[in-house]
Image (spheres, rainbow, N blue to C red):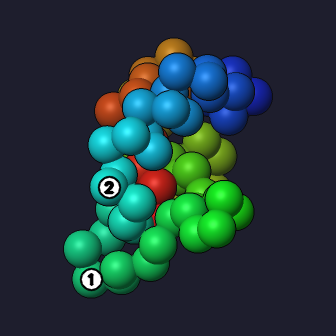
Amino acid sequence: MGSLARNYTDNTVKKLYALSRNACANPECGKILIEDGIHLGEIAHISAVSPNGPRYDPNMNDNERRDFKNYFLC
């Protein structure tokens, strides 16, 4: 379980970074995601992939966990 959800597409990555305005999704963080061409941000799931992860939703399937709406950059 979870392997498909961790296999995000190039389009998802591009869309996340394009919409990020180069800032962490947490408005209290302020972390820059790319500096001098180096990727400093990480892609994370809103609802966790692992049953032991934070905000895990057992009602979601891997395709729902893999959906763009379940990702954010931090």
User: The disc labelled 1 sits on which kind of residue?
Assistant: Glu
The residue identified by callout 2 is 21
- In the structure shown, which secondary structural element does the residue marked by tag 2 occupy? loop
Query: Nearest the camera: 13 or 37?
Result: 37
- Extreme-front residue of the structure: 36
Q: Is residue 59 above or below residue 70?
A: above
State the image coordinates of residue 60 (x, y, percent, origin top left): 43, 27
Instruction: Please indicate, yes or no, whether residue 12 appears anywhere in the rendered image.
Output: yes
Query: Nearest the camera: 39 or 52?
Result: 39
- Extreme-left residue of the structure: 27
Residue at 42% x, 32% y is: 15
State the image coordinates of residue 1 (x, y, percent, origin top left): 72, 28
State the image coordinates of residue 61 (x, y, percent, origin top left): 50, 21
Instruction: Please indicate, yes or no, whether residue 70 appears anywhere in the rendered image.
Output: no
Q: Are marks 2 and 1 in contact (CB under 8 Å)?
A: no
The residue identified by callout 1 is 28
- In the structure shown, which secondary structural element does the residue marked by tag 1 occupy? loop
